Image: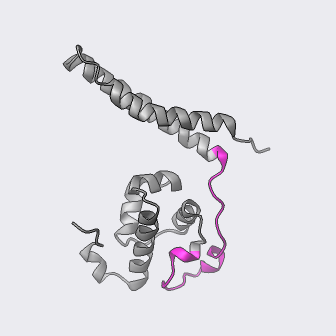
């Protein structure tokens, strides 16, 4: 099935359709899933889904997406009716700081720990003679360890 926009976009204002198409196009050019974009932008996956379905974005949401895509906010609204605040949106928003990267990494580590604990418990209860939990632990843990090493080489600077 080809990636198409929801049929309900037909009934939406043209500016929301353009914004939704722009967000989806930029995400697909980078070969990011909606979840990856949400994580990079500091948004929920549901927010990204809603935006791609044509929901009206808040200014802060547009700023977060622009920072994730490393583009000016105005590019997300190309072909859209200008907002009253569009003048403030013409500048490129700064990319996430190293401090954000460390916070995101800690969140990933927490999720990894929780999920792997649950999988280990399932493995021990249902199939203790075959430790299959090692495979997802390695598949997820190795990239996580690489990220930890990269953060150690470039530690976040503290403001102040």
The residue positioned 50% from the left and 68% from the top of the image is 58
Query: Looking at the picture, how far across and down is residue 120, in whole percent?
Result: 32, 22
Is residue 118 visible in this depiction of the protein?
Answer: no
* Residue 132 located left or right of residue 41: left
Is residue 25 visible in this depiction of the protein?
Answer: yes
* Magenta span main SS: loop
Start-end of magenta stretch: 74-99
Near-viewer residue (128 or 67): 128
Query: Looking at the picture, how far across and down is residue 93, in whole percent?
Result: 64, 65
Quadrant where the N terminus sits is bottom left
Q: Is residue 100 magenta?
A: no
Query: Looking at the picture, how far across and down is residue 112, in whole percent?
Result: 43, 33
The image shows a total of numbered marks equal to: 0
Q: Quadrant of residue 83?
A: bottom right
* Residue 59 located left or right of residue 37: right
When the figure is inspected, residue 147 is found, relative to residue 122, above or below; the finding is below
Q: Is residue 79 magenta?
A: yes
Query: Looking at the picture, how far across and down is residue 114, in whole percent?
Result: 40, 29
* Residue 130 located left or right of residue 80: left
The residue positioned 26% from the left and 21% from the top of the image is 123
When the figure is inspected, residue 79 is found, relative to residue 41, above or below; the finding is below
The residue positioned 24% from the left and 76% from the top of the image is 7
């Amino acid at each position: 099935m080809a990636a198409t926009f929801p049929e309900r976009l037909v009934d939406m204002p043209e500016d929301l359709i353009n914004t939704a198409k722009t967000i989806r196009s930029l995400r697909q050019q980078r070969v990011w899933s909606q979840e990856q974009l949400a994580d990079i932008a500091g948004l929920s996956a549901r927010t990204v889904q809603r935006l791609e379905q044509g929901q009206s974005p808040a200014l802060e949401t547009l700023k977060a997406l622009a920072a994730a895509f490393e583009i000016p906010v105005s590019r997300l609204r190309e072909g859209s009716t200008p907002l009253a605040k569009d003048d403030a949106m013409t500048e490129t928003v700064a990319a996430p700081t190293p401090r954000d990267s460390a916070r995101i990494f800690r969140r990933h580590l927490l999720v990894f720990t929780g999920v792997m604990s649950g999988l280990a418990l399932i493995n021990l209860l249902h199939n203790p003679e075959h430790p299959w939990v090692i495979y997802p632990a390695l598949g997820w843990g190795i990239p996580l360890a690489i990220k930890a090493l990269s953060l150690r080489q470039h530690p976040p600077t503290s403001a102040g």
